[in-house]
Amino acid sequence: MSSGHGHGSHGRSRKKHEDHEEHENHERWAVSYADMMTVLVGLFIVLFAMSQIDTIKFEQLRRSLAIGFGQQAPSMMAGGAGVLSGLDTYEISPDFTASVVDAQIQDPPTPDTDLSQEQKNYDLAVTEYERLADIVDKISGALDQENLSDRVTFRVSDRGLIIGMVADDVFFSPDSATLTPTAGVVIDTTGSVLATLKDQISVEGNANTLPSQRYETNWELAADRATKVARRLVERGYVPGNRIAAVSFGDQRPLADDGGDPYSANRRVDLVVLTPVSDEIRKYLPDIAAERG
């Protein structure tokens, strides 16, 4: 009886030991929870993408999500009619030609919206001023080689770059529109730089207030001076005729009195490189010129 009793006890001990080794996994919910959150994140991203009108970015997002979940990039193929009338169903099938590079979403750079329109216009005016200043440097450098840099003045206005040919009797004799030899060299040297531009050129003739003895009025005298300069620029191939004009101001736009001889100073022709920028931009050019000196 004692042996039977011992055998029975041994059986119960084994049973108890086997029950003790069985463990229930109480953390399985975490795996399911993580899967659910992953699906929800993907769902919300898809919903957000679908709310956008940009179909190209949606297609890129769809490919990116498919690759992110370990699937080949899908392609969308039109299928048969759906349950609702008037709607089409689509079948998602693998697209084995897709690559990870194609799936990357590239957003175009957005402009800086923090700058006001006024600041943007000012920045564009600075750029235009620097372009005009570069023209000045080129013309000055070319005239330096001819020792004639002191025969021309430069000024930036809201119209553009004004190249003034003013030097007493260097360009025109009193009451005359005949170009002197020095005037010809200055025009040719300046024209070689103007030939590289695309801007419109205004050739503006001026006269002093002394009555002309050879022309009916100073308007005709100033017009003849402007025409002589424009003709030389066109006939020698520096500026095409369709982007140059000769203008006469007579004696109505004299230079400010700087202590010199106003009669000689206003016996002049101005070459104006007309800036192509808008009025909202060009209005800043005089202030920038004053600041830059």
Image: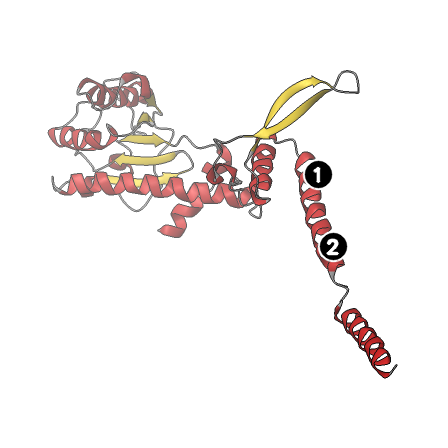
Viewer-proximal residue, 76 or 152?
76
Disc 2 residue type (three-letter): Tyr
133 lies left or right of 66: left
Compared with 145, 234 (above or below) is above
Image side of residue 56 versus residue 97, left or right: right
- Give the residue at x 73% y 53%: 32
Q: Is residue 65 left or right of residue 178?
A: right
**Where residue 47 is drawn, which disc sits there?**
1
Secondary structure under tag 1 reads: helix
Q: Position of residue 25 (x, y in %)?
A: 75, 63
Q: Where residue 139 sits: x, y (%)?
A: 22, 38
Give above or below for 39 relative to 180.
below
Query: Could you tell me how many numbered marks the image carries?
Result: 2
Q: Residue furthest right?
A: 1
Three-letter code, disc 1: Leu
What residue do we see at 17% from left, 20% from top?
236
Chosen colour scheme: secondary structure
Q: Residue 64's spot in the image, x, y percent? A: 56, 40
Q: Is residue 184 visible?
A: yes
Tell me the number on the disc at residue 33: 2
Kindly report which numbered mark, 2 or 1, lies closer to the viewer in this rendering.
2
Pick the front one: 34 or 172: 34
Say the numbered circle drawn on residue 63.
Answer: none
Query: Please, what secondary structure does the residue beneath circle 2 have?
Result: helix
Q: Is residue 171 visible?
A: no
Determine the residue located farthest toward the bottom in the rendered image: 2
CA separation in Å, label 2 and label 1: 21 Å
Quarter location, residue 241: top left
